Image (tube, grey):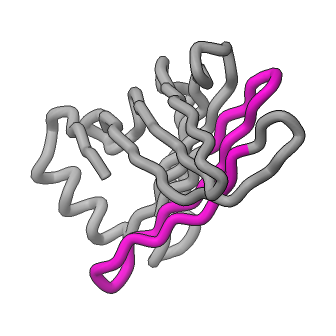
């Protein structure tokens, strides 16, 4: 599961992406000009470091009334690794962001099954780029 958030002076975006049972579920919104509208689509392209923490992300958001926004996240850090339970681990990253060229702040969170994460970290010691 991934949470993606950014807040600028005139626009905000928020979404959660869940990959489960072979499906992708996205819920979120685009807030602009006083209108908070649910998302129709969200594309994510991101780079994870060798510890599976976010380093950068480029996103495209489209809401149900056709408005779109391009949001980038850079400068990954500070990072927070939180082992919530034996079945759930979080990797959180505060980041600088830009919403359609406007300075913003961002926060990205990815949750993992700890056993899957441990096996993946053992296999991958180089940065990973993902498109969803």
Of helix, strand and loop, which mostly describes the magenta segment? strand
In which quarter of the view is residue 87 placed? bottom left
Coordinates of residue 18 in the picture (x, y in percent): 46, 69
- At 20% from the left edge and 57% from the top edge, which residue is drawn? 120
Coordinates of residue 9 in the picture (x, y in percent): 81, 21
Front position in the image: 64 or 21 = 64
Q: Which residues are magenta?
A: 5-30
In which quarter of the view is residue 92 placed? top right
| Residue 97: in magenta span | no
Residue 33 horizontal side relative to residue 114, left or right: right
Front position in the image: 132 or 65 = 65
Residue located farthest toward the bottom when viewing the structure as drawn: 21
Residue 44 horizontal side relative to residue 69, left or right: left
- At 30% from the left edge and 71% from the top edge, which residue is drawn? 115
Coordinates of residue 88 in the picture (x, y in percent): 49, 71
| Residue 27: in magenta span | yes
- At 34% from the left edge and 78% from the top edge, which residue is drawn? 23
- Can you see residue 89? no
**For residue 76, above or below residue 18:** above
């Amino acid at each position: 599961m991934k949470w993606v958030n950014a807040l600028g002076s005139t626009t905000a975006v928020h979404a959660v992406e869940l990959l489960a049972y072979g499906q992708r579920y996205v819920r979120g919104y685009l807030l602009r000009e006083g209108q908070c509208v649910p998302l129709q689509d969200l594309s994510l392209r991101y780079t994870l470091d060798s510890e599976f923490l976010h380093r950068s992300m480029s996103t495209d958001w489209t809401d149900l009334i056709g408005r779109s926004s391009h949001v980038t996240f850079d400068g990954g850090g500070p990072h927070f690794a939180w082992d919530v339970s034996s079945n759930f681990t979080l990797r959180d990253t505060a980041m600088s962001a830009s919403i359609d060229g406007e300075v913003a702040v961002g926060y990205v969170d990815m949750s993992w099954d700890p056993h899957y994460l441990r096996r993946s970290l053992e296999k991958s010691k180089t940065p990973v780029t993902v498109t969803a």
